[in-house]
Image (cartoon, rainbow, N blue to C red):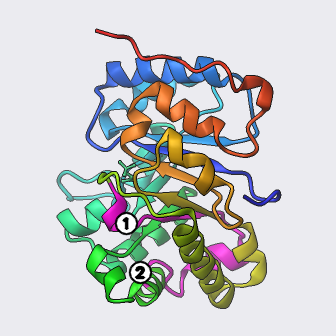
Amino acid sequence: MNETRKQIIAGNWKMNLTAEEAVAHLTRLDLALGKTEAVEVLVAPSFVALTEAHKALRWSRIRLLGQNMSEHAAGAYTGEVSGEMLLTSGCVGAILGHSERRQLFGEDNELIGRKVVRAFSNGLFPVICVGETESERDAADTERILAAQLSGAFPTVVEEFIVKKRADFAVAYEPVWAIGTGKVATPEMAETAHRFVRGWLTKRFSETVSLSTRILYGGSVKPDNAAGLLTQANIDGALVGGASLVSEDFFKIIQAAPGFPIEQRAAAPSDPVD
Ligand code: PGA
């Protein structure tokens, strides 16, 4: 954690929770969270739950992300969702380049770069995911893979937004071998990768950009390992999958962020037992 970068705890719900379930989950979470501004809380419901979630969060500090977004502005792209659609459904940003999109839906570095540019032009906050597979880590190839993914995600045109307009974005370091597997990177392993990403951003843009960019860790973050990760110098938050679906667990992860007010640590919401 770093005092000048407000931590982000983001929940990626993937293909889970109907609109009705999303509203119930968010209502519990919002009640527990209260008005604290110390940590930024973001959630990414399914596209079809966004409008209802947005209505439920009208008075809340919790903000919405899309889980993905088209590289195109509009047109004949069956099944796609545009940045403008996300914005008008209440999203402030979008998760781009998640490893499931890369591995299961064939998204490559260049496509992700075009999506990042589109997100910036729509005024959305991109959360750009990068991370190595287990075999890449075993082959000591992690940094080369991260550098290639980052180069693809930041084509030359992004300078217009990042350098000239100071548009904000986040990078999520999510080692593929840790996603949904229960195998979490140790705080030291994660910190080393985060330092590499920050150094890359310094070389690519500037120290000002790199020092103000939030770099999140993702991959089996749970209430019992969150504090160890979130207290590392270059870890500015978490992107949480499975544990973000359980109000109590997600709230405990938010509470583990070093900036979270101590007086609010007791009140964890509990999920209804059906
Ligand atoms: P997980 O997912 O927390 O279930 O490992 C993280 C992610 O996919 O962003």
Tell me the residue at 67%/62% (across/down).
232
Question: Left or right: 188 with respect to 78?
Answer: right
Label 2–label 1 contact, CB within 8 A? yes
Tell me the residue at 25%/54% (across/down).
80
Residue type for callout 1: Gly
Check disc 1 and report the residue beneath it: 97
Q: Which of the two labelled residues, at mark 2 and mark 1, occupies the earlier sequence position?
A: 1
Q: Is residue 10 above or below residue 117?
A: above
Coordinates of residue 206 in the picture (x, y in percent): 73, 84
Tell me the residue at 49%/25% (across/down).
248
Residue type for callout 2: Gln
Question: Left or right: 219 with respect to 17?
Answer: right
Q: Is residue 123 above or below residue 197?
A: above
Coordinates of residue 223 in the picture (x, y in percent): 51, 39
Question: Left or right: 197 with respect to 69?
Answer: right
- Magenta part of the protein: which range? 152-179
- Along the line of sight, which residue is nearer the eye, 183 or 42? 183
- The secondary structure type at the circle numbered 1 is loop
Q: Any mark on residue 149, and which?
A: 2
Q: Is residue 48 magenta?
A: no
- The secondary structure type at the circle numbered 2 is helix
Q: Residues within 10 Å of mark 1 (few under 14, many from 20)?
A: many
Q: Residues within 10 Å of mark 2 (few under 14, many from 20)?
A: many
Quarter-wise, where is residue 41 in the image?
top right
Between marks 2 and 1, how big is the CA–CA gap? 9 Å
Quarter of the picture containing the N terminus is bottom right
Coordinates of residue 244 in the picture (x, y in percent): 43, 37
